[in-house]
Image (cartoon, rainbow, N blue to C red):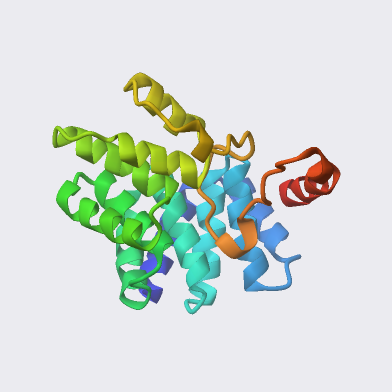
Amino acid sequence: LQDYLDKVHARVQQLLSKGRKDSLNKLISQLNSVEELSELGVMLFYLDAPSDAVWCLTKAAAKDRTDHSTLNNLSAILNMIGAENISLPVLRYLETMHRDNSTVLNNLGQALFGLGEIEESKKKFEECLRIYALHPQANMAMCLIKESEGKDPGKNIQQSLEGAFTQEALTMAQQRDIKLDPKKIKFRTRPDKYEYFNPLKYLPPAQCENVWEAKEKEEQWKGWAK
């Protein structure tokens, strides 16, 4: 694993200009821990700097291979930038120790799906959904798989929107004329773009459901966004 992470980091280094690398090295010299370096990587991804994000996360993971949250975040980002072939070995490693972790299973399923390994990805998504039936991304992927098999994907889209509202899932439902049960959906306007990597740190606050909660919940959302 150490050798693999070092090689991935070296490949990313080649994509960055000297000025960019100097800036990153100056930035990380001000950090106090590997955890902060890992969190910086996630932040850079949200700021649309994927190469910088992978650079930070591979460096953090190489410094502390026992931090499986960092390895999982790295894999998730690699999947989302179309580098599933690079994330797959890391996810295979994580699966050996986290066989009942829905996030790892979903990320593994996404990597396999992106590489065209549909049957194996389906098995991983099914394992994920047995643990967490409302997993948004796993359900959306299962929708596409079921469609390819000529099956009705309606249940998976409904479950995806029950787990977390995303515009992508709603659009999929509208395009397929899938009738949804609106009572089970909390229409979330924030956030709606990426899956949360570390559920303990990045899970958004609960939705505001009545006017008396509004002030308190708005402050919680502002804190989460910051």
Residue 153 at least partly seen: yes
Nearer the observer, 159 or 76? 159
Q: Quadrant of residue 75?
A: bottom left
The residue located at (56%, 50%) in the rendering is 52
Nearer the observer, 125 or 211? 211
Nearer the observer, 23 or 43? 43
| Residue 51 drawn at (x, y percent) | 51, 47
| Residue 23 drawn at (x, y percent) | 68, 52
How many numbered tags mark residues here? 0
| Residue 30 drawn at (x, y percent) | 76, 65
Position of residue 3 in the picture relative to residue 38 (left or right): left
The residue located at (61%, 55%) in the rendering is 203
Q: Quadrant of residue 149?
A: top left
Placement of 30 over or under 96, stated as above or below: above
Placement of 88 over or under 219, stated as above or below: below
Position of residue 176 in the picture relative to residue 147 (left or right): right
Nearer the observer, 183 or 111? 183
Placement of 194 over or under 150, stated as above or below: below
| Quadrant position of the N terminus in the picture | bottom left
Residue 10 at least partly seen: no
The residue located at (35%, 45%) in the rendering is 139
| Residue 97 drawn at (x, y percent) | 36, 77
